Amino acid sequence: MIKIAPSILSADFARLGDAVQMLERSGADWVHFDVMDGHFVPNLTFGSTMCKALRPLTRLPLDVHLMVDRPQDYIQPFCKAGADKLSFHIEAVNDPLPLLKQIQEAGMSPGLVLKPETPVSACEPYLPYCDLVLLMSVNPGFGGQSFIPETLDKIRELNERKHALNLNFEIQVDGGINVDTAAACRQAGVTVLVAGSAVFKAVNPAEMITKLRG
Ligand code: DX5
Ligand code: ZN
């Protein structure tokens, strides 16, 4: 079954604890944390101390999406804060392999993230070391943008590579997910959908999560 990872970037930052508990009650599978450093992307959000503060409030896996320069500096802090999954951008590093291994050794699930303009071929050598590959379907930095339709071809291509190589990583898509784009992504072979505004702006978040799952 498709997993839904709502992004707390779209929650009320004055009530993040309530938001995380609401997500668990509403049937979310993971909680997605968008960590932005104001350098890699032109926006600044929160770091590992926020993750540490929210960790005791839910049993859901905490899925951290680093949009930062020097992701290597964030592995130990997020490990200590109780993150379950840690993904970083391939564009932020020269060689992703040592970082993927360090994240794994720290006991977290490693993930690699590709911006919309980065081709799937860029991550191919690293696929055996990834528990998840995140394809951005908007330019990273802000919630509430429109889904870039070319992402669907990238999902299909990545899914083909996954099967050809007999690998088991999750294919995650992030940005502009609503009921319509979710259906298209599911058909293309996605396994985890991130959704910010769709879930937090919904009158009934639980119903929206069920609809996105299809
Ligand atoms: C964008 C973030 C996304 C964003 C998704 O940089 O990585 O997770 O919060 O928000 P929506 O679903 O509103 O596009
Ligand atoms: Zn994200």
Image (cartoon, rainbow, N blue to C red):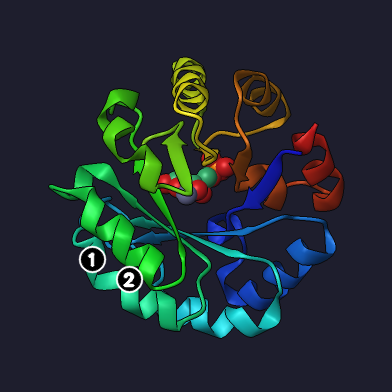
- Whether residue 161 is visible to the viewer of this picture, yes or no, is yes
CB at disc 2 and ligand 2 closer than 8 Å: no
Q: In the figure, 85 relative to 212: above or below?
A: below
Q: Residue at x 56, y 70 (%)?
A: 13
Q: Quadrant of the C terminus?
A: top right
Q: Residues within 10 Å of mark 2 (few under 14, many from 20)?
A: many
**x, y percent for residue 208:** 80, 42
205 lies left or right of 177: right
- Classify residue 198 by image quadrant: top right
Spatial CA distance of label 1 from label 2 is: 6 Å
Q: In the figure, 12 relative to 114: above or below?
A: below
For the residues labelled 1 and 2, say whether their Cβ atoms are less than 8 Å apart.
yes
Q: Which residue is mark 1?
A: 72
Between 34 and 190, the one nearer to me in the picture:
190
**x, y percent for residue 52:** 51, 83
Between 7 and 58, the one nearer to me in the picture:
58
**x, y percent for residue 117:** 29, 26
Q: Residues within 10 Å of mark 1 (few under 14, many from 20)?
A: some
Q: Residue at x 51, y 78 (%)?
A: 82
Between 11 and 50, the one nearer to me in the picture:
50
Residue type, numbered disc 2? Ile
- Classify residue 176 by image quadrant: top right
Q: Which mark is residue 75?
A: 2
- Whether residue 38 is visible to the viewer of this picture, yes or no, is no
Secondary element under disc 1, as helix, strand or loop, is helix
Residue lying at the far left of the rendered structure: 94
- Classify residue 67 by image quadrant: bottom left
